[in-house]
Image (cartoon, helix red, strand yellow):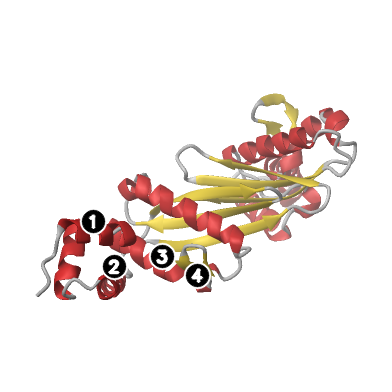
Amino acid sequence: MTAITASMVKELREITGAAMMDCKKALTECDGDLEESKEFLRKKGQSIANKKSSRETKEGAICIEQDGEKVTLVKIACETDFVARNENFTSFIQSIAKQNIEVEGEDLMEKTASGGPIKEQFIEAISKMGENIVYVEGVYWKAESGSQIGAYTHSNGKIGVLVELAAKDAKDTEKAKSLAKDIAMHIAATQVESISENDLDPSVIQKEKDFLIDQAKDSGKPMNIIEKMVEGRLKKFKKEICLMDQPFVKEPDKTIAQIIKDAAGDIGESASVRRFYKSSF
């Protein structure tokens, strides 16, 4: 029987990140063989992951990583806010986000990136942190020619937003990117259903219209009056949920459309929001 030394345990822990006691047990079970011990811990991690897979995951965090014209938003869930705020979890989600850029965001859980097979990285994370950890979504964007991507993550890691600003005539690309980031921050703080009224999903309007009609019926007014009341309220509703019509959170006396127009000298006369994406817990 090989004597298990502290240096052997330390080496295995540095390689796998597993707890000291788990490393010592693995080395003992495998008679000091390092490779066998690594496999022992990997199988143990899979077993732990299987046991925890049915646990509910309501907490978690969102991470955004940007590399030049490429950007990714990754949302990963866990069981408790304690783990969501843990440094190990933060490092893990940052690592996954960076690897999502490597594989360009498609079928991430089936891919192998710089950190190894993504599925195995999740198994290891579950084993280390003792909670069920689930990949919820990953969004990968590559800026189109003449566009700048701005990103914003709220300080608690619960909200993340991406905005792509089309600014092909921009004299100052950094200002264009900064404006895109400001708009992303605005979206994080507000309810935005579409960029403009033209992009609005008709089902959203119909749902609100039905609600307003039902509400107005309680007034006892005739249907022709109710329809006029609802028409006015719907116009207000559209302005409230369309990005271009909303008052900018940093300058409430101006709409998003106005701040883009004001920046035309630096980002071009034809600048516009091409797309946005918001994710939250």
**How crowded is the residue under tag 2: few (<14 C-alpha within 10 Å), some, or many (20+)?**
some
Secondary structure, mark 1, is: helix
Spatial CA distance of label 2 from label 1 is 27 Å
Real-space CA distance between mark 4 and mark 2, rounded to the nearest whole angstrom = 18 Å
Q: Which mark is residue 121?
A: 3
Image location (x, y in percent) of residue 177: 72, 38
Left or right: where 66 falls relative to 47: right
Q: Quadrant of the N terminus?
A: bottom left
Amino acid type, residue under disc 1 in the picture:
Lys
Q: Earlier in the sequence, mark 4 or mark 2?
A: 2
Is residue 79 in sight in this rendering? Answer: yes
Label 4, on which residue? 109
Q: Report how many numbered discs are placed on residues in the image.
A: 4
Q: Which residue is mark 2?
A: 52
Foreground mark, 4 or 1, reads 1
**In this figure, which residue is indicated by the disc labeled 1?**
10
Q: Residue at x 69, y 43 (%)?
A: 237
The label nearer to you, 4 versus 2, is 4
* Mark closer to the chain start, 3 or 4: 4
Q: Amino acid at mark 4?
A: Met
How many angstroms separate mark 3 from mark 2 (CA)?
Answer: 15 Å
Q: Position of residue 253 (x, y in %)?
A: 72, 23
